[in-house]
Image: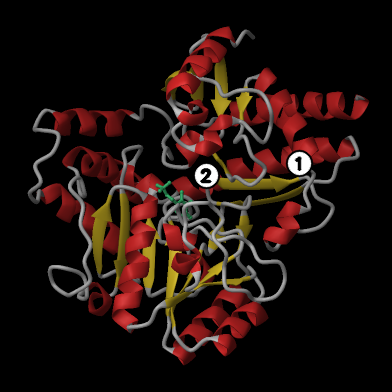
Amino acid sequence: MGTQESLKAFNKAKDLIPGGVNSPVRAFSSVGGSPLFIAEGKGGYLIDVDGNRYVDFVQSWGPLIFGHRDESIEAAVIKAVKHGLSFGAPTEAETELAELVVSMFDSIDKIRFVSSGTEAVMSAIRLARGFTGRDDIVKFTGCYHGHSDSLLVEAGSGAVTFGNPSSPGVPADFTKHTLLATYNDIDSVKNCFADCSDIACVIIEPIAGNMGLVPADKEFLLELRKICDENGALLIFDEVMSGFRATINGAESITGTKPDIVTLGKVIGGGMPVGAFGARAEIMAQLSPEGPVYQAGTLSGNPVAMAAGLAALSKLKKNVLVMSVLNSRATRLVEGMQKEAESCGITMQIDTRGSMFGFFFNEKPVKNFADACNSDAQLFAKFHSGMLREGFYFACSLYETGFISTATTDEMIEDTIKASARVFKAITDG
Ligand SMILES: *Cc1c(COP(=O)(O)O)cnc(C)c1O
């Protein structure tokens, strides 16, 4: 399997684009090697510029729940393109998509569309601050909420700390309102509220997907809800990744905890750039032009992107069983790989939620970011490159969640498990 063309493309890109990529996680830096340049996608497969074909477990980092080039999404996009790419004036497609999302999420009465998950979360935080009249926010170490300044905050070890920026270019003044807590550890949240009386909101990925797949415990979320209520703080579920991926009715439908604000992205655009945030009417009424909290976007609610999102979500809503089918495939995949790993003496922690799957090369269950960091990164890198050589495209970081689509067939899953057996054996044979 040659990858010369990818390498050539990468070298040229590096001359013009920092690191050769437009989003750092694509660069393969944590697993070694260089990224594949993609020529096309087809159902459950990716095809690179050298003509190699891979079973795709990344699915554009989540959005493509129906795989590449789903016929109904493709047709909806082409139809919309023929009416014009953008108007900067309202279209009915926006209301239709809004109606669909509102029908799926109990906690959302009204919604606003933006163009990325980052934008959705950034706007939701502003809204929470505007609504409560408070400045501070609580986030959890290991949860990712996009790259806006106040959310790019480093993990403080152990004790509650006011966050330090995790990137140069973010003034400490901008992150001094961000408090850090530990995922699945309610005492760490209590400490934040004990330290600070100006907390506008707690933001969490209820099914964390950016430290590997680490779902929050039900009990923990219930407690979190209680603490927010007692202190007049809002609870934000960042479901940019888990929304329409773990379940079609939001994490609230499987955890029993209702958030005040939900942020969405990825699947909601069916592969086009869409983000959204929604809440009950009273909160959304604070948003401009109804209320004083400013938020805007030239391409927000873009008609082509709305058409893709509408096609994807209406298909999901119509096929109520799709999530359980996807989940049994995802479960088969990680259980099969775990069994092969075990027979080579390798311990793997596995989990799934809907079409999301996660695995860690770790002796102990993973409940938070510190646990995730104790995983065997070298083993993951070997697994990743071994599977890639076999024709299976996994996310190039152990801190990412895997995704299957409706185009990921049972046969692809069985082939993946068989390939993993060869890869584990090669790794342990040294
Ligand atoms: C991907 C992601 C984001 C950021 O979305 P972008 O579209 O990449 O800006 C925010 N929150 C979560 C939970 C995500 O997974």
Q: Residue at x 29, y 58 (%)?
A: 101
> Callout 2: few (<14), some (14-19), or many (20+) C-alpha neighbours within 10 Å?
some
Q: Which mark is residue 111?
A: none
Residue 15 falls left or right of residue 123: right
Residue 334 falls left or right of residue 262: right
Q: Secondary structure at mark 1?
A: helix
Q: CB atoms at circles 2 and 1 under 8 Å apart?
A: no
Residue 177 percent across, percent down from the top left: 47, 73
Quarter where residue 400 is shown = top right
Q: Secondary structure at mark 2?
A: helix
* Spatial CA span between label 2 and label 1: 31 Å
Residue 154 percent across, percent down from the top left: 60, 60
413 shown above or below 102:
above
**Residue underneath mark 1:** 377
| Identity, as a three-letter code, of the amino acid under mark 1 | Ala
Q: Which mark is residue 325?
A: 2
| Identity, as a three-letter code, of the amino acid under mark 2 | Val
385 shown above or below 189:
above
Residue 75 falls left or right of residue 161: left
User: For the residues carrying marks 2 and 1, which lies nearer the camera in this image?
Assistant: 1
Residue 264 falls left or right of residue 419: left
Earlier in the chain: of badge 2 and badge 1, it is 2
How many numbered marks, from 0 up?
2
Between residue 414 and residue 98, name the one nearer to us. 98
Residue 419 percent across, percent down from the top left: 73, 24
